[in-house]
Amino acid sequence: MKVSGYIDVIGINQFGTRVIQKMNEGLCTAKLKEEFIRMILSKLNILINDFNGTHIVIKLIKMLSYPLNDEIYNAINENIIEISNNKFGSQTIPKCFEFGNDNQRVNNN
């Protein structure tokens, strides 16, 4: 399935969010996970600031460990003001502290 060009459209839909989360759960190789992360990162600002899309980002934060999740933490850190001032985006910040490693927690302060 080719969803990369539509990840934002699919991800902000209530049912589409579930599809994207299930896709993430089914990724079995590091290469596929890296490609999926890049796809999400390309639309991170749209997803993270949406009621449904933020669930995709939170699921990634929970499921992936360092170093795979580091790009997500870096992208959140680069946009921390916008994200923390958004009703839905702000929900991801506590998850970063909860699931990040010590270095990621320090860098997100």
Image (spheres, helix red, strand yellow):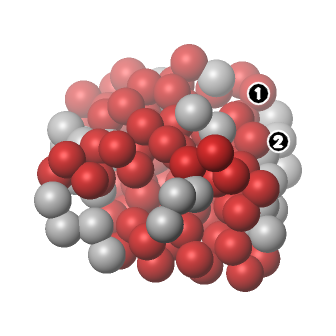
- Residue nearer the viewer, 27 or 85: 27
Q: Relative to residue 100, is residue 103 depicted above or below?
A: above
Amino acid of disc 2? Asn
Q: Is there any visible trace of residue 46 in the rendered image?
A: yes
Against 67, is 89 above or below? below
- Image coordinates of residue 38 in percent, x first then y, are 43, 37
Badge 1 density bin: few <14, some 14–19, many ≥20, Cα 10 Å = few
Distance between the Cα atoms at labels 1 and 2?
6 Å
Tell whether 18 sits left or right of 97: right
Q: Nearer the viewer, residue 107 or 53?
A: 53
Residue 58 in view:
no
Q: Which residue is mark 2?
A: 86
Residue at image coords 76%, 27%: 82
Task: Identify the secondary structure beneath mark 2.
Answer: loop
Horizontal and vertical percent for residue 108?
Answer: 45, 28
User: Would residue 59 be found to the left or right of residue 88 on screen?
Assistant: left
Residue pointed to by mark 1: 82
Compared to 17, does 58 lie above or below? above
Q: Residue furthest top?
A: 78
Say if mark 1 contacts mark 2, CB within 8 Å: yes
Instruction: Write down the quadrant of residue 27 in the picture.
Output: bottom left
72 lies left or right of 48: left
